[in-house]
Amino acid sequence: MSTLSHPYKDCPEPKEVPTEYRKDVDALFEWIKQQPRFPAFTLNHAHLFLHACHWVIEDAKKALQKYAHIHATAPDIFDNRDILSSGVQLVLNMTHMVSLPKLTPEGYRLLCYRLSDTDPSRMNFAEAVKTFCMFNDVQISKDGPIDGYIVVFDMKGVRLGHLARVQFGPLRTFMSYIQDAHPVRLRKIYIVHTASFINQVMALIKPLIRSELLGLLQFCSSGPIDILPAELLPKDYGGPLTELAAMHAEQKKEIETDYREWLIDSGSLKEAPKNSTTASSGSSSIKPPVKGFRGLEID
């Protein structure tokens, strides 16, 4: 059972909901409380998922169900969420995972990911996915239900050896989670400094990508300065902001000190095991994998 405030660490009380959607949020929360295998999701969860799903209640229900189910059935990704564990620390020490401080004019948050250690032999793909999800949960806690996210994946330093380290199980979990359960509005995914073997990468992941997500992808052989406003970028990308490495170090320290206990506690937010009552009555609330999630939006 969770003992801390989720999904926002510093907001135990419900966030303000737009007036026109208050009844929908309340209705979704009442539905949540009636689900026998759901953990202690909060009114803030109802608000967050409804916002991510553009206020469509049935889509929010499916996303919540998928979220709880994936968290319960992918322990390699969602259990043992200690930011100081050796596996997570290895990932944090060989990558830069950064939330940029300035929003776009549309109100979107920019998230940047790149390698800082390019040795493929050091990469553990499952731990990388776990760390990525933990970082994103912290960002959701900080931002609340904002208008959207733009993701920048920098492929500089990525080699074929990294591709060989990809594990299909964690990859499949990750793609399902991002498309069906991640409670954010994803607006664009830029792949910059695109590697020459990008077709091999796409051949690996394309069977797992639906058209909605595929439509968000944009590839660029140069850096983000050619596709994003310079004033939003760090110095090493041609902008005026602090270098990415420095921002990563600062945010890493913040997560380790302020969010360690919260992340460990978040491991309880998953579908509860079947008990004899739910098994015999057929009252399990978890449905088969959903076909769509309105958190993905193409502008």
Image (spheres, rainbow, N blue to C red):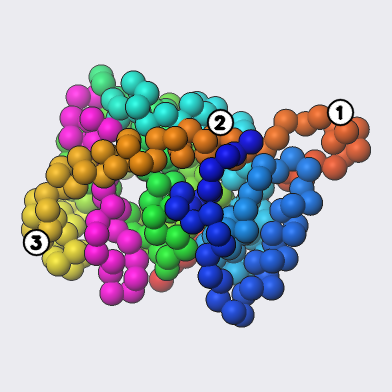
Q: Which residue is mark 2?
A: 74
Contact between marks 2 and 1 (CB within 8 A): the answer is: no
Q: Which residue is mark 3?
A: 240
- In the figure, 45 relative to 273: above or below? below
| Local crowd size for mark 2, using a 10 Å CA cut-off: few (<14), some (14–19), many (≥20) | some
Contact between marks 3 and 2 (CB within 8 A): the answer is: no
- In the figure, 167 relative to 17: above or below? above
The earlier-in-sequence mark between 3 and 1 is 3
The earlier-in-sequence mark between 2 and 1 is 2
x and y percent of residue 102 in the render? 24, 64
Q: Is residue 189 magenta?
A: no
- The residue depicted at 53 percent of the width and 48 percent of the height is 5
Look at label 1 and name its amino acid: Ser
Given residues 34 and 108, the one toward you in this image is 34
Would you identify the image quadrant in which residue 25 lies? bottom right
Residue 69 appearing in the image = no
Given residues 152 and 204, the one toward you in this image is 152
Report the Cα–Cα distance between label 3 and label 2: 40 Å
- The residue depicted at 55 percent of the width and 76 percent of the height is 18
Relative placement, left or right, of 168 versus 135 is right
Q: Which residue is mark 1?
A: 276
Span shown in magenta: 92-120
x and y percent of residue 3 in the render? 58, 39
Report the Cα–Cα distance between label 2 and label 1: 23 Å
| Local crowd size for mark 3, using a 10 Å CA cut-off: few (<14), some (14–19), many (≥20) | few
Instruction: Give the residue at the far bottom of this rendering.
Output: 20
- The residue depicted at 62 percent of the width and 75 percent of the height is 21
x and y percent of residue 181 in the render? 56, 49
